[in-house]
């Protein structure tokens, strides 16, 4: 779109968002939900689960006036463009006025929705129903301390692995063929899905039985495209495993971002970055990529698990990733609760970043301007990435306890056990249970940081 078209596009988006909000919050919709509630469905039935979710979403939406929804949509349309320019020039001040508006509108939104302790709770509820800032703060504080204790050993160990070990020539066609083979092996169904190239990998369900994954390619590095595919295919398996005939209802929809991200992280990290994965895939990978023949499966595993603190969240390793999130969470909560002014975001970011990761941020583009989320009005979204990591480790632990042959299966490239366990415990549940109850039913307890910490400790060593 040419830059000049932005103001009109912003009006179009605001109008569409307003229309959608007005339709959903219409009185007749409320009456229909009440009728359903009076129909006396068995509380354990599919119908009751749908009605419960519709009620929850309706009650939340009706508290927010359409004008506010439109205003926020219009504001973020302009803010996303301003953010692109600000990031390009690495100048936070170009984004600041937009950020101020977004923050003020988001706070108004939280006030309309209502909350007990923190306005941040009202925002979180949109992405991770039931989670609160105080619960997250407790979990993240534990996690932060535990990660800090493991990090030095992990970095030390990684320093023995050359950073360019996997550099080579990997033609895009070969990457595409190998990625497809891996996605098929873990169960991604290409009769209702596709993989296409993009700048920023994502997974999107267009409709029932139509799930699109994207990845990006670099001919000198197959790792980026492969692990994006494993990540997005993990999201895709969840989407494909939802009850397809219930498409568009809560029962046919993913329940939260933290659960969604657990599915992508589980396949990307717990399966894909394991020694077992490369034990099985090494010969096939060498057929596609002859440059890998000089490396053993152990060397490849060590290289893809290198831990090195870096500036950009999306490029960070498994050990440091959650530290990037802890930082964003703390900044967001302070902004929303009014303890931090937007003008101070760059300095607080840089200071905290150095404390957490030991690196000095010198450019806003590598600091507080790197992600698009705030420009899109998505405040309260970041913590769900870490919840995804915690959930993934917890699910993996439960799965392994239930299946003593799991490790053997993974070494043989057999993923049916993992696939069907997830399908049964998570995918086919849709939004029948809210996240905490879903984790409770799948693993016997709500989300904890313990399993992720133990997993990382085992993998990377440290006290
Ligand atoms: Mg993801």
Image (cartoon, rainbow, N blue to C red):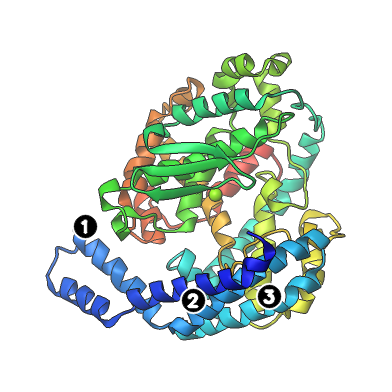
Looking at the image, which is closer to me, 23 or 273? 23
Secondary element under disc 3, as helix, strand or loop, is helix
Tell whether label 2 touches label 3 (CB within 8 Å): no
Q: Nearer the viewer, mark 1 or mark 3?
A: 3
The residue lying at 78 percent from left, 26 percent from top is: 165
Q: Name which quarter of the figure residue 406 lies in.
A: top left
Mark sitting on residue 46: 1
Mark sitting on residue 122: 2
How packed is label 1: few (under 14 Cα within 10 Å), some, or many (20 or more)?
some
Q: Is residue 81 left or right of residue 184?
A: right
Indicate whether 343 appears above or below 219: below
Q: Where is residue 434 in the image (x, y as percent from the top left)?
A: 37, 61
**Residue at numbered disc 3:** 99
**Disc 1: residue Cβ within 8 A of ligand 1's nearest atom:** no
The answer to whether any part of residue 276 appears in the image is no
Mark sitting on residue 453: none
Secondary element under disc 2, as helix, strand or loop, is helix
Looking at the image, which is closer to me, 134 or 68? 68
Secondary element under disc 1, as helix, strand or loop, is helix
Q: Position of residue 310 (x, y in %)?
A: 78, 49
The residue lying at 74 percent from left, 23 percent from top is: 169
CA–CA distance in space, label 3 to label 2? 19 Å
């Amino acid at each position: 779109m040419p830059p000049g078209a932005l103001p009109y596009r912003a009006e179009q988006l605001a109008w569409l968002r307003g229309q959608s909000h007005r339709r959903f919050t219409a009185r007749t919709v409320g009456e229909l939900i009440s009728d359903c509630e009076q129909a006396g469905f068995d509380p354990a039935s599919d119908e009751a689960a749908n009605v419960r979710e519709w009620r929850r979403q309706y009650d939340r939406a009706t508290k927010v006036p359409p004008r506010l929804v439109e205003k926020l949509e219009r504001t973020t349309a302009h803010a996303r463009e301003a953010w692109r320019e600000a990031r390009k020039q690495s100048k936070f001040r170009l984004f600041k006025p937009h950020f101020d508006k977004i923050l003020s509108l988001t706070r108004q939104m939280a006030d309309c929705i209502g909350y007990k302790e923190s306005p941040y709770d009202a925002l979180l509820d949109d992405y991770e129903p039931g989670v609160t800032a105080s619960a997250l703060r407790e979990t993240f504080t534990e996690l932060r301390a535990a990660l800090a204790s493991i990090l030095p050993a992990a970095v030390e160990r990684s320093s023995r692995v050359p950073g360019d070990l996997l550099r080579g020539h990997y033609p895009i066609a070969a990457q595409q063929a190998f990625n497809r083979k891996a996605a098929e092996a873990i169960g991604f169904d290409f009769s209702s899905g596709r993989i296409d190239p993009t700048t920023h990998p994502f997974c999107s369900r267009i409709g029932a039985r139509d799930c699109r994954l994207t990845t990006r390619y670099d001919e000198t590095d197959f790792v980026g495209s492969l692990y994006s595919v494993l990540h997005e295919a993990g999201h895709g398996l969840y989407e494909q495993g939802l009850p397809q005939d219930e498409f568009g209802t809560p029962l046919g929809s993913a329940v939260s971002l933290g659960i969604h991200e657990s599915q992508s992280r589980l396949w990307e990290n717990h399966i894909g970055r394991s020694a077992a994965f490369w034990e099985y895939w090494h010969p096939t990978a060498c057929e596609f990529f002859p440059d890998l023949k000089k490396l053993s499966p152990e060397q490849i595993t060590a290289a893809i698990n290198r831990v090195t603190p870096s500036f950009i969240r999306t490029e960070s390793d498994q050990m440091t990733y959650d530290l990037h999130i802890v930082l964003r969470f703390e900044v967001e909560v302070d902004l929303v609760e009014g303890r931090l002014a937007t003008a101070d975001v760059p300095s607080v970011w840089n200071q905290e970043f150095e404390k957490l990761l030991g690196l000095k941020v010198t450019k806003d583009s590598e600091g507080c301007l790197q992600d698009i989320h705030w420009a899109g009005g998505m405040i309260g979204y970041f913590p769900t990435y870490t919840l995804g990591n915690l959930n993934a480790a917890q699910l993996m632990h439960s799965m392994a306890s239930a299946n003593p042959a799991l490790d053997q299966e993974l070494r043989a490239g057999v993923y049916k056990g993992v696939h069907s366990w997830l399908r049964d415990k998570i995918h086919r549940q849709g939004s029948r249970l809210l996240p905490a109850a879903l984790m409770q039913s799948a693993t016997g307890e709500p989300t904890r940081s313990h399993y992720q910490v133990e997993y990382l400790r085992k993998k990377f060593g440290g006290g």
